[in-house]
Image (cartoon, helix red, strand yellow):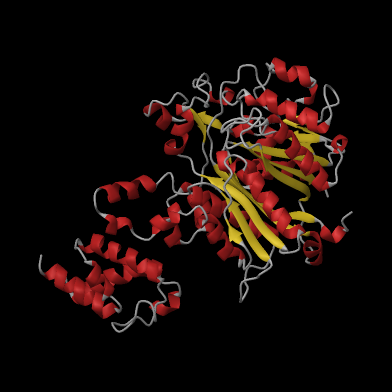
Amino acid sequence: MLSDDDGVVVTGIGVVAPGATGTRALLDLLWSGRSAVKSDTRLSELNFNCRVSGQCELSQDTLAGALSELEQRRLQSRGLQFARVAGHEALCASGLTLELAHPCARRSVVFGGAVPGIDVLRDAFALTDAGRVRKLGSTTVELQMPSTAAAHLAAKLRAGGQVTCNSAACATGTEALAIGFERIRSGVSDVVLVGSTEAESPHLWAAFDAIRVLSGNHNATPAKASRPLSASADGFVPAAGAGALVLERKSHAHARGARVWCEVLGAATNCGAQMNGGSMTAQNPESARLCIEAALTNAGVSPHEIDVVSGHLTATNADSREVGYWAKALERQGSQFPLINAPKSIWGHALTASGALELVACVLQLDGGFVHASLNCEDLHPDVAQLISPARVVREARPVEQLRILAKASFGFGDVNACAILGKV
Amino acid sequence: MTRSEITTRLRDIITPYVQEPSALTGLTEASELIAHLHINSMHLIDIVLDVEAAFDIEISADEADKLTTISAALDLIESKTSNT
């Protein structure tokens, strides 16, 4: 057993999500039952099969609050802007002292993602192809480095410990939390800013459209396009954004009287090695189940204690398989299954940012004692209905008394898995 | 363009790159971009590009290396703009 002081808590959250910039707006969106998916004319013009997406909005005021004038000019990458805005909100909300004379070795940053400048690097490529390398300027380096967001946020946090970027496809955000959690639990850090970010870019999404994993049947009705758990799901809706969470040693947070949002009880990551049914694009079912079980063991939580499952659930044919992993790992089926919802039903799939965005949504649900609706699953997939009672799928946002423990998982290409167990404080 | 007009435009260009705004108040031709104005050396690359665009001139890598002070920058811009 861990003593109280060994715990890890969340003391700050920040988010840029489609339809919600800032945690207050996200809370409203989660309660509203609205879809944040919209028509995307750029995708139409480019002949995508999928012509809807989850797009984020950053006002000039929001940008100016998180980035200097020079940075606003230099950092045109939306991925970096999202990370800076979400990180800024989380750090401000944490109440941590950000004015230090020296870097604090007990503070770290693990901020995941892929290529931050994927939406703007084509300009640099064009200059290079035209033989005008000298015209690139200094920004290109920062647009290429996956660790740029972490480096920027480390400067804000005065982090003198490990500052790095993890990258594990769609498991990235949840993996970042798992890494930060372990750093604190192992005694190396007191504070770890974790999260992940993804830009909105046809150049990123084209690859997914090409392999036919994006939705294409609901272009005329964007709000209906992201349909996790539904029999008429036909692929995921691409999205973007960033989520940031300040993880902190419980005793450290208590000593400074910090506002605590929830506790991280445990986390685990693993890989199915593309064996036994796993592949580059599908999970090895046994490994996905083992990852959930490992997170429960790590948390010291028994399967029957899970009140809510926040699924990875992308609106592909992997959804019913995923419900199967949960049912096996939790040893619960039918009406005994926990409540389950799919955050991607609201704004789509933000790829490497998805786990972090969704974890912020999980923190808000635990803190507020409610569950958000899983949209667009009126026609529950029959394979899902065979495993769990349809009543366990949250159809409308509602308060939940005795909401104590939530499980969140993210599954990624490369057959990688990450799972986190969060508890109410 | 007079040297004073060039100075005004150059000052506008470098202002966002100066990390200590107070350093700008004592700006003279002898001011060194890195030592006095605390401009990040990486951003000198961007300042050169901004100057090229603002004055419609080309600055070679060798010329850029010599731009260590305000006066050196003014001299170079003056010589390039007077040729056109």
Hey, which residue is sitting farthest bottom in the picture? B30
Q: Is residue A256 left or right of residue A3?
A: left
Q: Which residue is at a point 28% across and 62% down the rendered structure image?
A: B49
Hey, which residue is sitting farthest left in the picture? B83
- In this view, A140 is above or below A406: below
- Decide which of A229, A256 is in the foreground and name it: A229
Q: Quadrant of residue A193?
A: bottom right
- In this view, A41 is above or below A366: above
- Decide which of A206, A321 is in the foreground and name it: A321
- In this view, B56 is above or below A174: below
Q: Which residue is at a point 82% across and 41% down the rendered structure image?
A: A405
Q: Which residue is at a point 44% across and 74% down the rendered structure image?
A: B21
For the N terminus of chain A, give its image quadrant: bottom right
Q: Is residue B29 left or right of residue A154?
A: left
Can residue A324 be seen here? yes
Q: Which residue is at a point 84% across and 39% down the rendered structure image?
A: A403
- Decide which of A12, A119 is in the foreground and name it: A119
Q: Is residue A257 left or right of residue A374?
A: right
- Decide which of A402, B6 is in the foreground and name it: A402
Can residue A17 be seen here? no
Residue B44 in percent (x, y) is at 34, 69
Q: How many marks?
A: 0
Residue A256 in percent (x, y) is at 78, 66
Residue A154 in percent (x, y) is at 58, 63
Residue B79 in percent (x, y) is at 15, 73
